[in-house]
C-alpha cells in the first residue's frame, strides 16, 4: 500500500520527524555519565537490546517497502507486532 492520501504522507512525515527526535534523545541518554550513587544502584537493561532488535526488524520491513514503492499488509502487521513487542519490553 503506497501512502496515496495527502494526510497519510503528512502523518508519515510527522512520525519520521518524531522518531528522529526519539533517536536523538536515546543517543543523548546513552552518552550521559551516571553519578556515583547511580552507579551503585545500576542494573543491566537487557530490554534495550531486545528493543534494538525489534527496531532493526521494523527498519528492514520499511526498507523493503521503500524499495518496492509500497508496503504490504503483512509488512504493516509485522511492523505493528514489533511495536507492540517494544511496548511490552518498555513496561518491564
Image (cartoon, grey):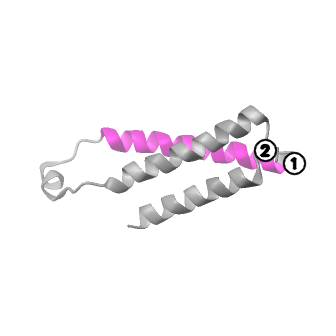
Q: In the rendered structure, does residue 13 fall within the stretch colored magenta?
A: yes
Q: Which residues are magenta?
A: 7-31
Tag 1 residue: 5
x and y percentages locating residue 4 in the rendered image? 87, 45
User: SS at mark 1?
Assistant: loop
x and y percentages locating residue 55 in the rendered image? 52, 47
Q: In the rendered structure, does residue 68 fall within the stretch colored magenta?
A: no
x and y percentages locating residue 54 in the rendered image? 50, 50
* Labels 1 and 2 touching (C-beta < 8 A): yes
Residue placed at 43% from the left, 62% from the top? 89
The residue lying furthest to the front in this view is 74
User: Would you say the magenta stretch is mainly helix, strand or loop?
Assistant: helix
Q: Residues within 10 Å of mark 1 (few under 14, many from 20)?
A: few
Q: Residue 9 has which mark? A: 2
Image quadrant for the C terminus? Answer: bottom left
57 left or right of 45 in image: right
Amino acid at each position: 500500500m503506497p501512502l496515496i492520501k495527502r494526510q497519510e504522507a503528512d502523518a508519515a512525515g510527522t512520525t519520521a520527524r518524531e522518531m528522529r527526535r526519539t533517536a536523538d534523545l536515546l543517543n543523548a541518554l546513552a552518552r550521559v555519565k551516571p553519578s556515583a550513587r547511580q552507579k551503585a544502584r545500576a542494573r543491566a537493561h537487557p530490554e534495550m537490546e531486545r528493543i534494538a532488535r525489534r527496531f532493526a526488524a521494523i527498519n528492514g520491513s520499511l526498507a523493503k517497502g521503500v524499495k518496492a514503492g509500497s508496503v504490504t499488509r503483512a509488512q504493516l502487521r509485522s511492523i505493528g507486532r514489533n511495536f507492540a513487542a517494544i511496548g511490552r519490553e518498555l513496561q518491564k
